[in-house]
Image (cartoon, helix red, strand yellow):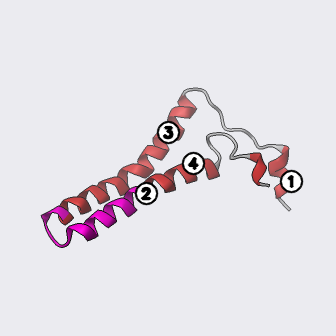
């Protein structure tokens, strides 16, 4: 049921959603600017920025989860609603 929300910070859906939207948004914007720039030095620089973002975005998601763990936010063991979904 979609009314449950996304759960705690460690749930796969929440971390995955944040990581994918961040990465894909940047990829699409930079790809669009690369198309507008055409084959030039600007395109090469944008490609370097794109590669940098593709490496650092997943690293940032990992750092976010690790910081939450170090701050004392523990992953939940699951809820009754999660157990109902398993059939």
Q: CA distance from mark 2 to mark 4?
A: 16 Å
On residue 64, which mark appears?
3
Q: Earlier in the sequence, mark 2 or mark 1?
A: 2
Point out which mark residue 25 bears.
Answer: 2
Residue 69 place in picture, x, y as percent: 57, 33
Q: Which residue is mark 1?
A: 84
* Residue name at image x 37 percent, y 49 percent: 56
Asked where in the image residue 37 lies, by quadrant, the reply is bottom left
Q: Is residue 85 rendered to the left or right of residue 14?
A: right
Residue sitting farthest toward the left: 41
Secondary structure beneath dot 4 equals helix
Distance in Å between CA atoms under marks 4 and 1: 22 Å
Q: Is residue 46 left or right of residue 85?
A: left
Q: State the residue position of label 4.
A: 15
Query: Is 75 situated left or right of 17 in this image?
Result: right
Dot 4 crowding, Cα within 10 Å, few <14, some 14–19, many 20+: some
Check contact, mark 4 vs mark 3: CB within 8 A. yes
- Secondary element at image label 1: helix
């Amino acid at each position: 049921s979609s009314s449950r929300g996304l759960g705690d910070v460690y749930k796969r859906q929440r971390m995955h959603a944040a990581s994918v939207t961040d990465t894909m948004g940047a990829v699409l914007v930079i790809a669009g600017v690369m198309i507008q720039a055409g084959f030039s030095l600007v395109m090469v620089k944008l490609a370097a920025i794109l590669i940098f973002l593709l490496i650092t975005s997943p690293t940032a998601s990992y750092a976010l989860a690790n910081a939450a763990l170090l701050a004392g936010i523990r992953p939940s063991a699951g809820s009754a609603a999660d157990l109902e979904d398993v059939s």
